[in-house]
Amino acid sequence: MTTPRHVAVMGVTGSIGRQTLEVLRTAPDAFVLDAVSGGTNLEALASVVNEFSLTRVGVARDEDRGRLAELVAPGVDIVSGPEGLQALSSESELVVNAVVGFAGLPVTLATLAAGHRLALANKESLVAAAPLVQRVRASGGDIVPVDSEHCAIHQCLVGSTTEGHPDVARLLLTASGGPFRQLSSAQLDTVTLADALQHPTWSMGPKITVDSSTLMNKGLEVLEASALFGMTVDRIDVVIHPQSIVHSMVEFVDGSLLAQLSAPDMRLPIAYCLGLPERLSTTWGRLDFTSGFQLEFSPPRRDDFPALDLAYAAARRGGAAPAWLSAANEVAVEAFLQGRIAWREIVAVVATTMDAYVDVTVATVEDVEREDATARRTAHATLPL
């Protein structure tokens, strides 16, 4: 890069945010960190602000501004809430959206509305508000996907016919299968929270780790891939690949198959998104072929992991159905993390919530927020008191 690229990282204290900082530290001449935001871990957030001598930072709650001010240098501009995130996201030329859940929507919309590049690790905002995101995206903003699967597809599609990708037969999203891939249906009845948080391949935050255990994460990725690459979900399949070396594949109409391979390391797709159109000279994800390894593939067990079919059904129904799916899942996962429901009940709560959904179109942010809130109320009503 001839001039440094100015970057903002929203959700900097989470797993993706922390790994983004690792990438930035390796290329101090290529990037300038302008601003960050974080959640309730104010000590970690302050540490980032102080390390990079930042003057702009965002917090989720207004009541945290005073406490953070005590931990950073005088004169740091501290903003809060969705409006604060929008302000920070509209000013840097590249914004990494690593905010967890629906709360990442303001970052997505503000970045794209400003005509800047969005490195998207927040799949929920695209799932819940795809029509809005696509409309804003058309004004000049650019989305590059941080998720390893979508980043892999992005790389494999280089050179493909762009509009609708008519030369592509299907996309194949790989899934590790999560910690319960080899458990029997009976064994799934007794899994615990501790079990669900032990992902065999990736080190991630609790919400996405639980989503991986139910395969809801893969269902959301199917919806995200449809929106990102302009393909219906009928052209998107999921395959279990426990080694997590093949991150996804593209099958073309002539039968050719392109795959992106690397060792499982999220810093590689992060670096890819930050550096485009160039590649950073790093060795994250480099495979050692001298030691040998195996690649295994199998279809998902849909009866034991019904979240996947719920996602496909929501995609085909359209309207606000994907927003309901994402919102209900957030409520159910939070209840599971709190010990209020069993693992099997996560997807059951989502399914019951989706049964109450009535078709509605989504045309504005207010529409999305209303449907998100309605879905959350419906999901909460299914939980034990």
Image (cartoon, grey):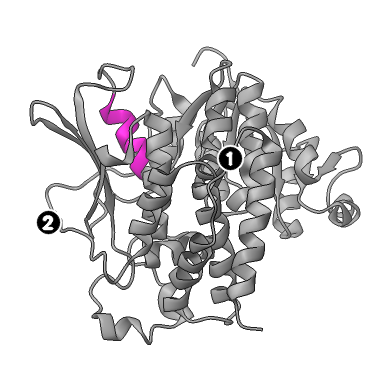
Q: Residue furthest front?
A: 358
Q: Which mark is residue 294?
A: 2
Q: Is residue 181 left or right of residue 87?
A: left
Instruction: Answer whether residue 150 is magenta in the image.
Output: yes
Q: Amino acid at mark 2?
A: Gln
Q: Residue furthest top?
A: 2
Nearest to the observer: residue 195 or residue 338: 338
The residue where tag 1 is placed is 97
Say whether residue 266 is visible. Answer: no
Residue under the image location 54 percent in, 62 percent down: 356
**Closer to the N terminus: mark 2 or mark 1?**
1
Q: Position of residue 133 (x, y in %)?
A: 56, 31
Q: Position of residue 148 (x, y in %)?
A: 37, 44
- Cα–Cα gap, marks 2 and 1: 34 Å
Q: Amino acid at mark 1?
A: Asn
Q: Residue furthest left?
A: 255
Secondary structure mostly seen in the magenta stretch: helix
Q: Which mark is residue 230?
A: none
Q: How many marks?
A: 2
- Image quarter where the C terminus lies is bottom right
Query: Magenta stretch?
Result: 149-157
Q: In the rendered view, tell whether residue 305 sits above or below residue 157.
A: below
